[in-house]
Amino acid sequence: MTFSDGNIDVAIDDGVLNVFRHFRQTGRKLEKGGILLGQCYDNDSIVIKKASTPTKFDKSHRFNFFRDKRLAQLFIDYEFLNSNGKTIYLGEWHTHPEDCPTSSGTDVKMIKNQFNKNRINEDFLIMIIVGRKSFYVCYFDGKRIIQLNRSE
């Protein structure tokens, strides 16, 4: 599955989509989330190859999710080292209990904080919100959040 704004293409591997589908917030399930890892090609083509899964150390509620930073960093470091520095941290994902999700003020604040407080390899971060029927995919370039649309 690929998302684009005409300038940047973000492809999501099938294994990552399976993670999203497994944790989709149907019924009375709690919000879940994790981090996104992958590779960038020519600054305009991004492939998300891995998504961390929630752990028992994360805190989940119906309308919010807080991941354990220590375990997330271990996941990032492991994948980075085992790919000879090719697989990098690209952003965050989480679920929403709505069919077609949109970003909340909390979501916007989170992605901006991640961008400003973390050492990142690229000049953007991706955020994916997994809804019951569709995804909200965007990137933050340090100034604005740009929503991507599904393209095939």
Image (cartoon, grey):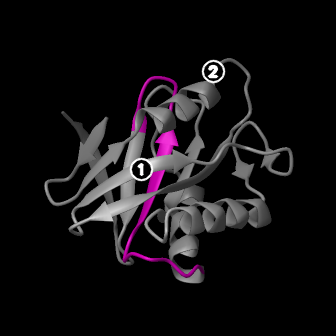
Residues at marks 2 and 1, CA–CA distance in whole angstroms? 24 Å
Between 49 and 84, the residue placed more toward the observer is 84
Residue 94 is situated, as x and y percent measured from the top left of the image, at 59, 45
Range of the magenta residues? 118-135
Which residue corresponds to the image point at 68% horizontal and 40% vertical from the top-left? 32
> What amino acid is labelled 2 in the image?
Thr
> What amino acid is labelled 1 in the image?
Ile
Which residue corresponds to the image point at 24% horizontal and 69% vertical from the top-left? 43
- Tell me if 139 is positioned left or right of 151 in this view: right
Do residues under tags 2 and 1 come within 8 Å of each other at their CB atoms?
no
- Please, what is the dominant secondary structure of the magenta stretch? loop
Disc number placed over residue 117 in the picture, else none: none
| Few, some or many residues within 10 Å of mark 1 (<14, 14–19, 20+) | many
Can you identify the residue that label 2 sits on?
26
Q: Secondary structure at mark 2?
A: loop
Which picture quadrant has residue 110?
bottom right
| Few, some or many residues within 10 Å of mark 2 (<14, 14–19, 20+) | some
Q: Is residue 81 above or below residue 48?
A: below
Residue 96 is situated, as x and y percent measured from the top left of the image, at 58, 37
How many marks on residues?
A: 2
Q: Earlier in the sequence, mark 2 or mark 1?
A: 2
Q: Is residue 78 magenta?
A: no
Which residue corresponds to the image point at 59% horizontal and 28% vertical from the top-left? 24
Between 133 and 105, the residue placed more toward the observer is 133
Quadrant holding the N terminus: top left
Q: Is residue 105 visible?
A: yes
Residue 134 is situated, as x and y percent measured from the top left of the image, at 41, 29
Most extreme residue toward the left, as rendered?
6
Can you identify the residue that label 1 sits on?
48
Quadrant holding the C terminus: top left
